[in-house]
């Protein structure tokens, strides 16, 4: 296999940009960008599997990422015995009654002949089941949320190592993708986009308002770390020795070591995913997926089960996004349902895939790193630019103060301009699909 010096140069330039950030701004900032870029690269890989391999237009990335983040809470947070005693069993019983109601309605739909009687029976089953479930579920969840709401007010989790939440987050996102795919994958691409976006909003609404599960907008903080905390590292002799040799403070050196440890974990995960994705893409299965993407009618004529293959790749891509969501919450140490917005967790990931080169796994990684770097640096760059162009104005100028206040919004202008330039001069991305 020939060496592609162009691709190596692009990654090297990205490394130089990160090194300059560390030298002229802060090594903590540079490592934070690297960690978030690695997590974004995992998300971009998931979207690239769906769009680049099979042409599935998923605009619900935010929902699958949030489900992965929820896994970190359910796995790593310790259980709250008082909340379980107050209404834990009742809440779970209510959920099971709701699931049984839906299952019963499905059985009625399949067993009865079409007609008004079937419709009326389904309505009675759903309404009655909802009423019975709410009678159990509502009082139980209210009792849970009243248990020390300033600190807990939710059931907690299993108290297991947080790193176990990463595969669990992938499995939870895969389960959601199976349900969504069964319902929505038969739709046309634009309707599929609307459906996935709507379902992701439903997921975020559940995380915000089901306080007994996620504390809602009160957020879940203090999630156990996957590596040693900086506070604990500061007392280590080797940390103090490194701080003396490098000139950093002990607290800053401890923070740098923590970020490097996280980066090592994320690199391992990303490396495994890229290896598996490359093996799959270059296998007969990968060639079949690209054939379905390029000409679905011809693939059906050759006997390929297109719907089944679409469901498979939709589940794989969504599971990858769920994995990234669990990794992100682990890095942040908290779950904040209000922070999940389409701009950050859907639009930005799509920009990464498009700029990097859809259909190319390495392009998705490069696009994630470049776009996240630009996303972080655009705000200070915009403020510097506004300060420079208004430097001739007198102090206290209303125009100058307004422009400086709105400088943060130049980030959106810069991102839009970058996307337009890429679509104009490199429509296939930085590393195009071969």
Image (cartoon, helix red, strand yellow):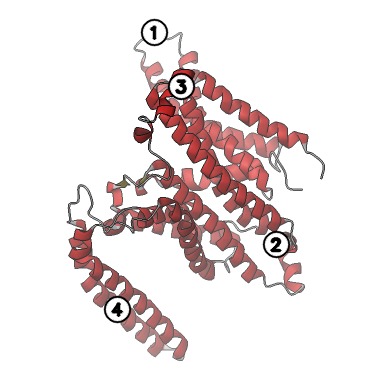
Q: Which residue is mark 1?
A: 394
Q: Residues within 10 Å of mark 1 (few under 14, many from 20)?
A: few
Asked where in the image residue 203 lies, by quadrant, the reply is bottom left
Q: Determine the CA span between mark 2 and mark 3.
A: 45 Å
Q: Which residue is mark 4?
A: 129
x%, y% of residue 297? 73, 68
The reply to whether residue 142 is visible in this rendering is yes
Residue 351: x, y in percent?
58, 42
In terms of sequence position, does the residue under pointer 4 or pointer 2 come before the other? 4
Left/right of residue 133 with respect to residue 324 in the rendered view: left
Q: What separation in Å lies between label 1 and label 4 (alpha carbons)?
A: 69 Å
Residue 190, image x and y in percent?
57, 58
Name the residue at 62% across, 40% down: 367
Q: Can you tell which of label 2 and label 3 is closer to the viewer? A: 2
- Judged from the image, the secondary structure of the residue bearing numbered disc 2 is helix
Circle 3 crowding by C-alpha within 10 Å: few under 14, some 14–19, many from 20: some
**Residue positioned 46% across, 62% down in the render:** 172
Nearer the observer: mark 1 or 4; the answer is: 4
Question: Looking at the image, do the residues carrying marks 1 and 4 touch, with CB atoms under 8 Å apart?
Answer: no
Q: Nearer the viewer, residue 373 or 278?
A: 278
Q: Which residue is mark 3?
A: 383
Tell me which numbered mark, 1 or 3, is placed earlier along the sequence: 3
**Alpha carbon of mark 1 to alpha carbon of mark 3: how far?**
17 Å
Whole-number angstrom distance, CA of label 4 to CA of label 2: 42 Å
Residue ID for mark 2: 289
Q: Are marks 4 and 2 in contact (CB under 8 Å)?
A: no
- Look at discs 1 and 3 and give the one toward the viewer: 3
Q: Nearer the viewer, residue 124 or 92?
A: 92
Q: Relative to 232, does residue 202 appear above or below in the rendering? A: below
Give the quadrant of residue 293: bottom right
Residue 230, x across and y down, in percent: 38, 34
């Amino acid at each position: 296999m020939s060496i592609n010096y162009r691709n190596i140069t692009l990654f090297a330039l990205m490394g130089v940009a990160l090194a300059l950030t560390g030298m002229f701004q802060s090594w903590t900032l540079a490592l934070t960008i690297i960690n978030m870029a690695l997590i974004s690269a995992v998300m971009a890989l998931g979207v690239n599997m769906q769009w680049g391999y099979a042409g599935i237009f998923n605009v619900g990335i935010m929902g699958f990422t949030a489900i992965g983040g929820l896994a970190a809470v359910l796995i790593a947070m310790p259980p709250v015995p008082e909340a379980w005693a107050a209404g834990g069993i009742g809440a779970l019983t209510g959920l099971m009654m709701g699931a049984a109601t839906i299952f019963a309605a499905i059985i009625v739909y399949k067993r009865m002949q079409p007609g008004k009687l079937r419709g009326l029976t389904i309505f009675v089953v759903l309404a009655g089941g909802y009423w019975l479930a709410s009678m159990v579920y509502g009082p139980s969840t209210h009792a849970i949320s009243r248990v020390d709401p300033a600190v807990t007010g939710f059931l907690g989790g299993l108290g297991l190592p947080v790193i176990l939440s990463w595969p669990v987050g992938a499995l939870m996102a895969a389960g959601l993708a199976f349900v969504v795919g069964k319902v929505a994958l038969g739709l046309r691409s634009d309707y599929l986009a609307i459906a996935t976006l709507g379902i992701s909003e439903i997921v975020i609404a559940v995380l915000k308002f089901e306080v007994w599960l996620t504390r809602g907008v009160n957020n879940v903080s203090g999630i156990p770390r996957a590596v040693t905390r900086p506070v604990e590292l500061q007392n280590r002799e080797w940390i103090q020795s490194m701080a003396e040799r490098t000139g950093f403070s002990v607290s800053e050196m401890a923070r740098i070591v923590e970020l490097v440890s996280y980066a090592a974990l994320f690199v391992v995960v990303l490396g495994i995913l890229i290896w598996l994705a490359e093996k799959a893409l270059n296998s007969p299965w990968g060639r079949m997926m690209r054939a379905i993407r390029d000409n679905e009618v011809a693939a059906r004529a050759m006997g390929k089960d297109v719907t089944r293959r679409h469901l498979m790749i939709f589940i794989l891509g969504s599971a990858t996004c769920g994995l990234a969501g669990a990794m992100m919450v682990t890095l942040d140490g908290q779950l904040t349902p209000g922070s999940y917005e389409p701009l950050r967790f859907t639009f930005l990931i799509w920009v990464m895939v498009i700029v990097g080169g859809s259909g190319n796994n390495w392009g998705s990684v490069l696009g994630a790193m470049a776009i996240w770097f630009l996303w972080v640096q655009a705000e200070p760059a915009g403020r510097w630019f506004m300060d420079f162009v208004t430097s001739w104005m007198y102090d206290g100028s209303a125009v100058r103060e307004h422009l400086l206040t709105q400088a943060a919004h130049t980030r959106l202008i810069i991102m839009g301009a970058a996307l337009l330039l890429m679509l104009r001069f490199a429509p296939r991305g930085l590393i195009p699909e071969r």
